[in-house]
Image (cartoon, rainbow, N blue to C red):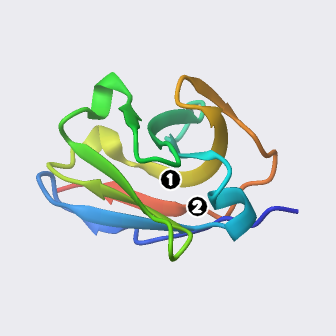
Amino acid sequence: QVQFVESGGGSVQPGGSLRLTCAAPGSIFSTYVMGWYRQAPGKQRELVASIGTGGSTKYADSVKAQFTISRDNAKNTVYLQMNSLKPEDTAVYYCNAQLGLSLSTPVFNSWGQGTQVTVSS
């Protein structure tokens, strides 16, 4: 069973920032595109940002210019810098692997525990 470990969430006021971290097994990290997904209460899980093994990135329209995804290949870690947070960004955030930047379906059925992001005044 693949293990993804997400961290860095918390409660912030609108306009605040958070940096999420996802650690993945090295064999996964070096092979696949990595993506950040989120699931808000009562909604389906959605892909918000992806990064290829070479550093190419893709974002959902809803988070462009607001979120930045990056990766540290030496640490098998992917990050999500979230700025100018809005209440609608409230969700549990997860990471998983993808087969390609334009393929949103996660590779693995197993998910980490996720990290809760709450944006509220």
Q: Amino acid at mark 1?
A: Tyr
Q: Residue furthest bottom?
A: 75
Q: Is residue 29 visible?
A: yes
Q: Nearer the viewer, residue 55 or 8?
A: 55
Where does residue 8 sit, x and y in percent of width and height?
40, 72
- For the residue pair 7 and 29, the one nearer the viewer reads as 29
Q: Position of residue 12 (x, y in %)?
A: 23, 64
Q: Secondary structure at mark 1?
A: strand
Q: Which of the image's four quarters has the C terminus?
A: bottom left
User: Marks 1 and 2, Cα distance to the nearest angstrom?
Assistant: 5 Å
Q: Is residue 115 left or right of residue 105?
A: left
Residue denoted by label 1: 93
Crowding around mark 1 (Cα neighbors within 10 Å: few <14, some 14 to 19, many 20+) is: many
Q: Residue at x 25, y 32 (%)?
A: 64
Which label was assigned to residue 114? 2
Q: Which mark is residue 62?
A: none
